[in-house]
Image (spheres, rainbow, N blue to C red):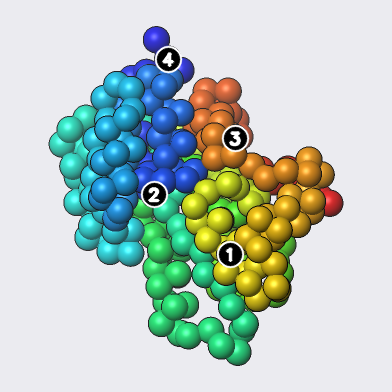
Protein backbone atom coordinates (compact mmCIF):
# COMPACT_ATOMS: atom_id res chain seq x y z
CA UNK A 1 0.00 0.00 0.00
CA UNK A 2 1.37 3.42 -0.99
CA UNK A 3 1.42 6.53 1.14
CA UNK A 4 -1.59 8.00 -0.69
CA UNK A 5 -3.65 4.83 -1.22
CA UNK A 6 -6.68 5.23 -1.61
CA UNK A 7 -6.71 9.05 -1.73
CA UNK A 8 -8.03 11.06 -4.67
CA UNK A 9 -5.73 13.81 -5.96
CA UNK A 10 -6.95 16.56 -8.29
CA UNK A 11 -4.09 18.25 -10.10
CA UNK A 12 -4.42 21.26 -12.39
CA UNK A 13 -1.71 21.82 -14.99
CA UNK A 14 -0.88 18.12 -15.14
CA UNK A 15 0.21 17.86 -18.78
CA UNK A 16 3.85 18.92 -18.55
CA UNK A 17 6.60 20.18 -16.26
CA UNK A 18 6.10 20.25 -12.51
CA UNK A 19 2.47 19.17 -12.90
CA UNK A 20 3.39 16.04 -14.85
CA UNK A 21 6.11 15.14 -12.35
CA UNK A 22 3.69 15.65 -9.47
CA UNK A 23 1.06 13.45 -11.11
CA UNK A 24 3.65 10.70 -11.50
CA UNK A 25 4.76 11.04 -7.88
CA UNK A 26 1.26 10.72 -6.44
CA UNK A 27 0.34 7.83 -8.74
CA UNK A 28 3.53 5.97 -7.80
CA UNK A 29 2.47 6.22 -4.15
CA UNK A 30 -0.99 4.77 -4.66
CA UNK A 31 -3.18 7.83 -5.26
CA UNK A 32 -6.04 8.01 -7.70
CA UNK A 33 -5.12 10.96 -9.92
CA UNK A 34 -7.32 13.34 -11.90
CA UNK A 35 -5.11 15.38 -14.21
CA UNK A 36 -6.76 18.61 -15.38
CA UNK A 37 -5.26 20.53 -18.28
CA UNK A 38 -6.25 22.51 -21.36
CA UNK A 39 -3.43 20.81 -23.30
CA UNK A 40 -5.35 17.61 -24.01
CA UNK A 41 -2.73 15.87 -26.14
CA UNK A 42 0.13 16.08 -23.64
CA UNK A 43 -2.25 15.56 -20.73
CA UNK A 44 -3.58 12.30 -22.13
CA UNK A 45 -0.01 11.13 -22.74
CA UNK A 46 1.05 12.04 -19.19
CA UNK A 47 -1.97 10.55 -17.46
CA UNK A 48 -1.91 7.49 -19.70
CA UNK A 49 1.59 6.71 -18.46
CA UNK A 50 0.64 6.79 -14.78
CA UNK A 51 0.44 3.78 -12.52
CA UNK A 52 -2.96 2.78 -11.15
CA UNK A 53 -6.29 4.58 -11.46
CA UNK A 54 -6.01 7.93 -13.27
CA UNK A 55 -8.07 10.08 -15.59
CA UNK A 56 -7.21 12.98 -17.89
CA UNK A 57 -9.85 15.72 -17.88
CA UNK A 58 -9.87 18.63 -20.31
CA UNK A 59 -10.05 21.80 -18.25
CA UNK A 60 -9.27 25.46 -18.88
CA UNK A 61 -8.66 27.00 -15.45
CA UNK A 62 -9.49 30.43 -16.88
CA UNK A 63 -13.11 29.27 -17.16
CA UNK A 64 -14.83 28.65 -13.81
CA UNK A 65 -17.48 26.52 -15.52
CA UNK A 66 -14.77 24.31 -17.01
CA UNK A 67 -13.36 23.76 -13.53
CA UNK A 68 -16.81 23.05 -12.13
CA UNK A 69 -17.38 20.37 -14.77
CA UNK A 70 -13.99 18.83 -14.04
CA UNK A 71 -14.63 18.60 -10.31
CA UNK A 72 -18.08 17.17 -11.00
CA UNK A 73 -16.47 14.48 -13.17
CA UNK A 74 -14.07 13.62 -10.33
CA UNK A 75 -16.92 13.35 -7.81
CA UNK A 76 -18.94 11.19 -10.21
CA UNK A 77 -15.97 8.87 -10.63
CA UNK A 78 -14.61 8.63 -7.08
CA UNK A 79 -16.97 10.52 -4.76
CA UNK A 80 -14.30 12.51 -2.95
CA UNK A 81 -11.30 14.84 -3.24
CA UNK A 82 -8.55 14.36 -0.68
CA UNK A 83 -5.81 16.51 -2.22
CA UNK A 84 -5.84 19.49 -4.56
CA UNK A 85 -2.62 20.58 -6.22
CA UNK A 86 -3.21 23.88 -8.04
CA UNK A 87 -0.28 23.83 -10.42
CA UNK A 88 -1.63 25.38 -13.64
CA UNK A 89 0.28 28.53 -14.47
CA UNK A 90 1.91 30.57 -17.20
CA UNK A 91 4.82 32.97 -17.36
CA UNK A 92 4.96 36.23 -19.28
CA UNK A 93 7.15 39.24 -18.73
CA UNK A 94 8.17 42.51 -20.23
CA UNK A 95 8.93 46.14 -19.56
CA UNK A 96 6.25 47.71 -17.38
CA UNK A 97 5.41 50.62 -19.72
CA UNK A 98 4.76 48.09 -22.48
CA UNK A 99 2.56 45.59 -20.62
CA UNK A 100 -0.61 45.03 -22.69
CA UNK A 101 -3.69 44.96 -20.49
CA UNK A 102 -5.03 41.98 -22.44
CA UNK A 103 -1.96 39.98 -21.41
CA UNK A 104 -2.34 41.11 -17.81
CA UNK A 105 -5.95 39.94 -17.73
CA UNK A 106 -4.96 36.55 -19.17
CA UNK A 107 -2.16 35.83 -16.71
CA UNK A 108 -4.40 36.87 -13.81
CA UNK A 109 -7.11 34.54 -15.13
CA UNK A 110 -4.72 31.57 -15.19
CA UNK A 111 -2.34 32.15 -12.29
CA UNK A 112 -4.60 33.83 -9.77
CA UNK A 113 -8.31 33.47 -10.56
CA UNK A 114 -7.73 29.88 -11.67
CA UNK A 115 -6.15 29.07 -8.30
CA UNK A 116 -8.91 30.81 -6.38
CA UNK A 117 -11.61 28.86 -8.22
CA UNK A 118 -9.92 25.48 -7.75
CA UNK A 119 -9.43 26.23 -4.03
CA UNK A 120 -13.08 27.26 -3.75
CA UNK A 121 -14.34 24.07 -5.41
CA UNK A 122 -12.01 21.72 -3.54
CA UNK A 123 -12.62 23.34 -0.16
CA UNK A 124 -16.39 22.96 -0.50
CA UNK A 125 -15.94 19.21 -0.97
CA UNK A 126 -13.31 18.89 1.76
CA UNK A 127 -15.42 20.76 4.32
CA UNK A 128 -18.13 18.12 3.90
CA UNK A 129 -15.50 15.39 4.28
CA UNK A 130 -13.98 17.00 7.39
CA UNK A 131 -10.46 16.64 6.02
CA UNK A 132 -8.31 17.53 3.04
CA UNK A 133 -5.10 19.08 1.77
CA UNK A 134 -4.55 21.92 -0.68
CA UNK A 135 -1.13 22.70 -2.15
CA UNK A 136 -0.88 25.79 -4.34
CA UNK A 137 2.09 26.23 -6.64
CA UNK A 138 3.36 29.81 -6.37
CA UNK A 139 6.94 30.82 -7.19
CA UNK A 140 10.02 32.35 -5.63
CA UNK A 141 8.83 35.38 -7.64
CA UNK A 142 6.22 35.76 -4.90
CA UNK A 143 9.03 36.56 -2.48
CA UNK A 144 11.50 38.47 -4.64
CA UNK A 145 11.34 40.21 -8.00
CA UNK A 146 13.40 41.39 -10.93
CA UNK A 147 12.80 43.97 -13.64
CA UNK A 148 10.25 43.02 -16.30
CA UNK A 149 8.38 40.53 -14.08
CA UNK A 150 5.60 42.67 -12.59
CA UNK A 151 2.78 40.58 -14.06
CA UNK A 152 4.14 37.23 -12.99
CA UNK A 153 5.31 38.35 -9.54
CA UNK A 154 1.96 39.97 -8.81
CA UNK A 155 -0.01 36.82 -9.59
CA UNK A 156 2.29 34.53 -7.65
CA UNK A 157 2.25 36.89 -4.66
CA UNK A 158 -1.53 36.66 -4.86
CA UNK A 159 -1.34 32.87 -4.71
CA UNK A 160 0.53 33.14 -1.42
CA UNK A 161 -2.17 35.51 -0.15
CA UNK A 162 -4.92 33.06 -1.08
CA UNK A 163 -2.98 30.28 0.63
CA UNK A 164 -2.59 32.10 3.92
CA UNK A 165 -6.19 33.23 4.13
CA UNK A 166 -7.53 29.82 3.12
CA UNK A 167 -5.36 28.14 5.75
CA UNK A 168 -6.88 30.27 8.49
CA UNK A 169 -10.41 29.75 7.23
CA UNK A 170 -10.22 26.02 6.53
CA UNK A 171 -8.09 24.88 9.46
CA UNK A 172 -11.09 24.30 11.76
CA UNK A 173 -12.44 21.88 9.14
CA UNK A 174 -9.33 19.71 9.20
CA UNK A 175 -7.97 21.12 5.95
CA UNK A 176 -4.38 22.22 5.52
CA UNK A 177 -3.39 24.77 2.87
CA UNK A 178 0.20 25.44 1.87
CA UNK A 179 2.12 26.81 -1.08
CA UNK A 180 5.38 25.82 -2.70
CA UNK A 181 7.53 28.52 -4.24
CA UNK A 182 9.79 26.86 -6.79
CA UNK A 183 12.87 28.51 -8.16
CA UNK A 184 13.83 28.14 -11.80
CA UNK A 185 13.05 24.55 -12.70
CA UNK A 186 14.12 22.74 -15.86
CA UNK A 187 10.78 22.66 -17.64
CA UNK A 188 9.80 23.55 -21.18
CA UNK A 189 8.31 26.80 -19.91
CA UNK A 190 11.54 27.87 -18.21
CA UNK A 191 13.57 26.96 -21.28
CA UNK A 192 11.24 29.16 -23.37
CA UNK A 193 11.65 32.00 -20.89
CA UNK A 194 15.43 31.52 -21.01
CA UNK A 195 15.44 31.91 -24.77
CA UNK A 196 13.21 34.99 -24.70
CA UNK A 197 14.95 36.84 -21.88
CA UNK A 198 18.40 35.69 -22.92
CA UNK A 199 17.88 37.23 -26.35
CA UNK A 200 17.24 40.64 -24.75
CA UNK A 201 20.55 40.32 -22.88
CA UNK A 202 22.57 39.07 -25.86
CA UNK A 203 22.79 35.64 -24.21
CA UNK A 204 21.85 32.16 -25.36
CA UNK A 205 19.20 30.25 -23.45
CA UNK A 206 21.88 27.98 -21.95
CA UNK A 207 23.93 30.97 -20.85
CA UNK A 208 20.89 32.52 -19.15
CA UNK A 209 20.09 29.24 -17.38
CA UNK A 210 23.70 28.96 -16.20
CA UNK A 211 23.52 32.51 -14.84
CA UNK A 212 20.33 31.69 -12.95
CA UNK A 213 21.90 28.49 -11.61
CA UNK A 214 24.87 30.46 -10.32
CA UNK A 215 22.45 32.73 -8.43
CA UNK A 216 21.53 29.79 -6.18
CA UNK A 217 23.38 28.41 -3.19
CA UNK A 218 23.41 24.95 -4.80
CA UNK A 219 24.67 26.29 -8.17
CA UNK A 220 22.13 24.35 -10.19
CA UNK A 221 18.49 24.51 -11.24
CA UNK A 222 15.75 22.24 -9.98
CA UNK A 223 14.38 19.16 -11.67
CA UNK A 224 10.56 18.92 -11.75
CA UNK A 225 10.64 15.76 -9.63
CA UNK A 226 12.34 17.68 -6.81
CA UNK A 227 9.42 20.11 -6.62
CA UNK A 228 6.98 17.20 -6.82
CA UNK A 229 8.63 15.60 -3.80
CA UNK A 230 7.96 18.66 -1.63
CA UNK A 231 4.36 18.84 -2.86
CA UNK A 232 3.86 15.19 -1.94
CA UNK A 233 5.31 15.82 1.52
CA UNK A 234 2.88 18.70 2.10
CA UNK A 235 -0.01 16.40 1.16
CA UNK A 236 1.17 13.60 3.44
CA UNK A 237 0.30 12.83 7.04
CA UNK A 238 3.80 13.96 8.02
CA UNK A 239 2.71 17.54 7.27
CA UNK A 240 -0.68 17.52 9.02
CA UNK A 241 0.43 20.23 11.47
CA UNK A 242 1.88 22.43 8.73
CA UNK A 243 -0.44 25.02 7.23
CA UNK A 244 -0.40 28.56 5.87
CA UNK A 245 3.21 28.25 4.73
CA UNK A 246 4.84 29.34 1.48
CA UNK A 247 7.89 27.13 1.23
CA UNK A 248 10.79 28.15 -0.98
CA UNK A 249 12.09 25.26 -3.06
CA UNK A 250 14.68 27.28 -4.90
CA UNK A 251 18.13 25.91 -4.13
CA UNK A 252 18.80 28.91 -1.88
CA UNK A 253 18.07 31.53 -4.55
CA UNK A 254 16.09 33.88 -2.30
CA UNK A 255 18.58 33.29 0.52
CA UNK A 256 21.60 34.09 -1.61
Which badge, 2 or 3, comes first in the chain's sequence? 2
Label 3 Cα neighbours within 10 Å, binned few <14 / some 14-19 / many ≥20 = some
| Labelled pair 2, 4 in contact (Cβ < 8 Å) | no
Which badge, 3 or 1, comes first in the chain's sequence? 1
Measured from the top left, where is residue 126 in percent x and y? 35, 38
Residue 202 in the figure: left or right of residue 25: right
Residue 68 in the figure: left or right of residue 144: left
Q: Mark 1 vs mark 4: give the one in front.
A: 1
Which badge, 2 or 4, comes first in the chain's sequence? 4
Res 195 label: 1
Q: Is residue 154 visible?
A: no
- Cα distance, mark 2 to mark 4? 23 Å
Res 13 label: 2
Q: Residue at x 29, y 39 (%)?
A: 45
Q: Is residue 113 above or below residue 42?
A: below
Q: Residue at x 79, y 53 (%)?
A: 215
Res 2 label: 4
Measured from the top left, where is residue 125 in percent x and y? 30, 41
Measured from the top left, where is residue 90 in percent x and y? 46, 61
Tag 1 secondary structure: helix
Q: Residue furthest top?
A: 1
Q: Quadrant of residue 178?
A: top right
Which badge, 2 or 1, comes first in the chain's sequence? 2
- Cα distance, mark 2 to mark 3? 17 Å
Q: Mark 3 vs mark 1: give the one in front.
A: 1
Residue receiving disc 3 = 226
Q: Residue at x 63, y 72 (%)?
A: 199
Amino acid sequence: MGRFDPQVVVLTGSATGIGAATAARFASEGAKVAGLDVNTTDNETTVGSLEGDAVAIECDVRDPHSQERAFSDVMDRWGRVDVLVACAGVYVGGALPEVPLERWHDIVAVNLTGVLVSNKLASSIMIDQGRGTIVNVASMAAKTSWPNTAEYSATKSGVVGITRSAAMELGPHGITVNAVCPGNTLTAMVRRVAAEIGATLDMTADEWLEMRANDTALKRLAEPAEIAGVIAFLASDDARYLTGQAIEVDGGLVLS
